[in-house]
Amino acid sequence: MRFSDIIGQNGVKELLSHGVDIGHISHAQLFAGRCGYGALPLAVAYAQYILCENRRDGDSCGVCPSCYKVAAMEHPDLHFSFPVSNSEFVIKRNTSGSSEITSDSLIEKWREMMNVCRDGDMQNTIPQGYFNESEWYEHIGIGKNGQGIINRSEAYEIIRKFGYKSYEGGYKILIMWLPERMNDSAANKLLKLFEEPAEKTLFILVSQSPDAIIKTILSRTQTVNIPPIGVEDMTDYLSARFPGIDAGAVAKSSQGDILSAHAMAEDNDEDDTNFNMFASLMRLCFAVNHTGLIEWGENAASLSREAQKDFISYSLRMLRDSYMVTVGVPQLNYSFGRHAQFITRFFPFVNNSNIEILISEFERVALELSFNANTKILFVHFALSISKLIRKA
Ligand SMILES: [Zn+2]
């Protein structure tokens, strides 16, 4: 994967390549940003740049032996670590007798996920390396509601791998995807390695919830913020792939997240879970229908973690766009289609008296979702408290 394969993110690409060019590479870095911003593909492109034998013009060459090996996810000095769980697939393969499985048991699945073009016809295929946590769990056969962890055996494996020199004499790199899934015991094992790494060692942690990473690990990393993909880059990308849509509107509404943008661009009207959930929550709130709100909360709790987070970001967009209309700047309302139509009736209920507290309530739920909260209690309580807040307006 080259930097040129990544959508937008020119600022980050320059920052990263320039660091390498002047020999400044921090040994433990945290790439923080949503999966749909491209944090993972950026980490791989960065690793490929560092390992490339023939870097030029701020990018890897793409054709040297090293670049080939990275592209195949088979470079001996590039290691991956990611959340795993005991899927049927793993149990079949796990012959070592150990009860805890590690990333190595799933490395073939990981390569498939990283390399295989997804979602049918080429035109609508999401580029390599852009996928979210539940897609990964679905791919390894534990279902999109599954939850993987980075466990102690994994930490031992990493320590073993980083205990000897690189094969090819250059850098030795670990890309750890979703370090927020690391448990205490793994984190304790890895602390010393992160603190006193061997020379030419690089750890890249790729996280979408840095708040949920164990603090001792977090404090040993240097953060590289991966921002949302810029509107212009997103518009260019979308208009090339989806000629029939209003690329500019979708780009704005997707808020820099390629996965959201694809979901919106491919939207067929029958499957609009977020819109339906938001609209029904608001209807129940206005009707002060307590039984309905409790049912709504239970239903929300039964969704996958990723779907729940998606709903929260969707709702935050709807609140933001409604507020823009309320305060007289409708041109900053980026919603379109029936989302916009809904806002024309809904906006007066989001105003200065409740916008802040509404947003913080949605954000609180998003944060608690990262911490394995009891989602049934969380969403029922949430639905009831939103009902109070929205009627306060
Ligand atoms: Zn190369």
Image (spheres, helix red, strand yellow):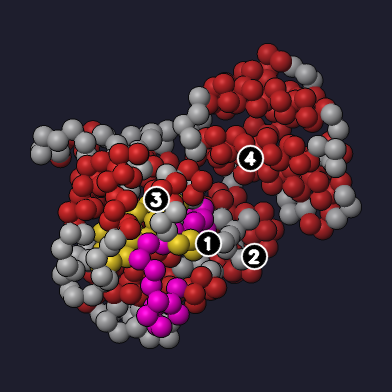
> Disc 4 vs disc 3: which is toward the camera?
3
Mark-to-mark CA distance, 3 and 1: 17 Å
Q: Nearer the viewer, mark 2 or mark 1?
A: 1
Dot 4 crowding, Cα within 10 Å, few <14, some 14–19, many 20+: some
Which numbered circle lies on residue 54?
Answer: none
Q: Residue at x 39, y 50 (%)?
A: 217
Residue 138: image location, x then y, percent = 37, 39
Look at the numbered disc 1 and give the secondary structure of its residue.
Answer: strand
Closer to the chain start, of discs 1 and 4, is 1
Q: Is mark 4 within 8 Å of ligand 1?
A: no
Q: Give the residue at mark 3.
A: 217
> What amino acid type is highlighted by mark number 1?
Asn
Cα distance between the residues tagged 2 and 1: 17 Å
Disc 3 is placed on an element classified as: helix
Mark 2, secondary structure of its residue: helix
Q: What amino acid type should be assigned to the residue bearing mark 4? A: Glu
- Look at mark 1 in the image and give the residue it sits on: 225
Q: Quadrant of residue 66?
A: bottom left
Which label belongs to residue 363? Answer: 4
| 10 Å crowding of disc 1: few (<14), some (14-19), many (20+) | few
Q: Residue under label 2, please give it.
A: 231
Amino acid marked by disc 2: Val
Point out the stretch of residues depicted in magenta: 16-39
Give the number of the mark in front: 3 or 2.
3
**Residue 19 located within the stretch drawn in magenta:** yes
